[in-house]
Amino acid sequence: MFRWLSVLIILVVISFSSHADSTKQEEAIKAKLVDSFPGHTPDSISKSPVEGLYEAVYGTQVIYVTEDARYLIQGIVMDLEDGKRDITEVASSRARKKYMTQVNEQKSISFGAEKPRHTITVFTDIDCGYCRKLHSEMDQYASYGIKVNYLLFPRNGVTSPSYSKAVSVWCSKDRAEALTKAKNGEELLAESCENPVADHFELGQKIGVTGTPAILTADGVLMPGYSPVKQLARRLDNMSNK
């Protein structure tokens, strides 16, 4: 009995020592990054699946740093022995999931299926051509059982004409109707009220939206750009079956 107890104590000590060394290394990498890029502190640092590389996450952006904190690598890391799995995207999706509560708490403008099989969040710009194309297919989205929750993302920022249009849409009596009219190129009466458009824009930036349309799934997967509805529905079905 005492021999087994001694072995257990040794294992605990080794485990604690390993954890302490890892934490010390993470702190050293964090200090180096903050020193190299003042004003930018990583949200988390942890060992990556690749031996000798640590994963540093800023919002939803993932970079890699060698364990001696000398070299920084930015790009996609793919596991060729695991179905060419993009482990960088896995880490980004994991980070985006942390923002999903904030996404779900945002007031949105909804279209599509009333009893959906899938619900997506779409960051949209009123003046974006592919955003308009996507919006013209709302009946198809409904037929495939997809609900669309729009968040307003004026690509050129909160001082742009698109931002003013987004505010007018939000402040209209019927937001869904106003959004459809605006996307059809109709000029809306300028409206002003308390609105979340700037919050939508800021949240989109946090989760990595750089263009529109940007589709965000309930699992935190970000799909930039327009996709045909049938193709999107198939992808969403595949995700839910995994």
Image: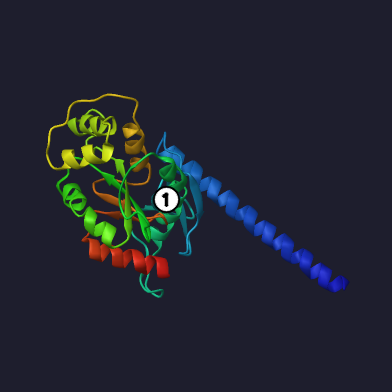
Residue at point 44%, 41% (across, down): 105
Relative to 2, is 201 above or below?
A: above
Which quarter of the figure is the C terminus placed in? Answer: bottom left
Q: Is residue 75 visible?
A: no
Graded by Cα atoms within 10 Å as few (under 14), some (14 to 19) or many (20 or more), the crowding at tag 1 reads many
Three-letter amino acid code of the residue under disc 1: Arg
Residue at point 40%, 75% (across, down): 81
Residue at point 33%, 41% (across, down): 205
212 relative position to 219: left or right = left
In the depicted view, which residue is nearer to us: 96 or 38? 96
Query: Number of callouts in the render?
Result: 1
Relative to 116, is 127 above or below?
A: above
The x and y percentages for residue 179 are: 22, 40
The x and y percentages for residue 84 are: 35, 71
The x and y percentages for residue 63 are: 39, 52
In this figure, which colouring scheme has been used for the structure? rainbow
Q: Is residue 37 visible?
A: yes
Q: Quadrant of residue 166?
A: top left
79 relative position to 170: left or right = right
Q: Secondary structure at mark 1?
A: helix
The x and y percentages for residue 128 are: 17, 44
In the depicted view, which residue is nearer to us: 239 or 94? 239
Which quarter of the figure is the N terminus placed in? Answer: bottom right
Residue at point 44%, 46% (across, down): 99
Q: Quadrant of residue 222?
A: bottom left
- Residue located farthest toward the right when viewing the structure as drawn: 2
19 relative position to 54: left or right = right
Circle 1 is placed at which residue position?
96
